[in-house]
Image (spheres, grey):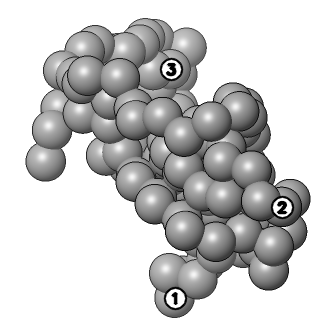
Amino acid sequence: MAFGEERDVRARFGTPIVDGDRAAVEWWAALVHEGREVTLAGTSVLHFDADGLVLEQRDTWNVRHGRSEPPAGWGAQERRSVVRRAPSTSERTTASIGTA
């Protein structure tokens, strides 16, 4: 898919998860590509420089034929615990990711 071939695009973005100079965000797009309606559900992982410009971007997505809406609750970041390794030791710490 190329952006020039797409029309009638409706894009949505979930709540980004940010850690220092990196971020991940899920996205949902319904559009018309080559005359056919499709829906894309994907994730972008980004790495930023000191000025906030993107150095790297990696995307993954799935394509579904037809136009569909995201499921209920999509894009809302739920409160959950994650385990992170402390940068200077092998101890594990628990961080909480919540809504902003």
Residue sitting at 33 percent across and 29 percent down? Answer: 74
Q: Nearer the viewer, residue 87 or 80?
A: 80
Please identify the residue farthest to the left as the structure is shown.
100
Badge 3, how many Cα within 10 Å: few under 14, some, many 20+?
Answer: few
Q: Nearer the viewer, residue 13 or 68?
A: 68
Residue 64 makes an appearance in the image = yes
Secondary element under disc 1, as helix, strand or loop, is loop
> Which residue is the site of mark 1?
51
The earlier-in-sequence mark between 2 and 3 is: 2
Residue sitting at 24 percent across and 24 percent down? Answer: 73
Secondary element under disc 2, as helix, strand or loop, is loop
* Residue 37, image x, y percentages: 66, 48
* Residue 63, image x, y percentages: 73, 34
Secondary element under disc 3, as helix, strand or loop, is strand
The earlier-in-sequence mark between 2 and 1 is: 2
* Residue 33, image x, y percentages: 76, 59
> Which residue is the site of mark 2?
34
What is the spatial separation of the Cα atoms under label 1 and label 3, in whole angstroms?
27 Å
Please identify the residue farthest to the front as the structure is shown.
35
Note whether 91 is above or below 85 in the view shown: above
The earlier-in-sequence mark between 1 and 3 is: 1
Residue sitting at 31 percent across and 46 percent down? Answer: 15
Q: Nearer the viewer, residue 93 or 60?
A: 60
Q: What residue type is labelled 2?
A: Glu
Please identify the residue farthest to the bottom as the structure is shown.
51
| Lateral position of residue 7 relative to residue 79, left or right | right
**Mark 2 near mark 1, Cβ–Cβ under 8 Å?**
no
> Which residue is the site of mark 3?
85
Disc nearest the viewer among 2 and 1: 2
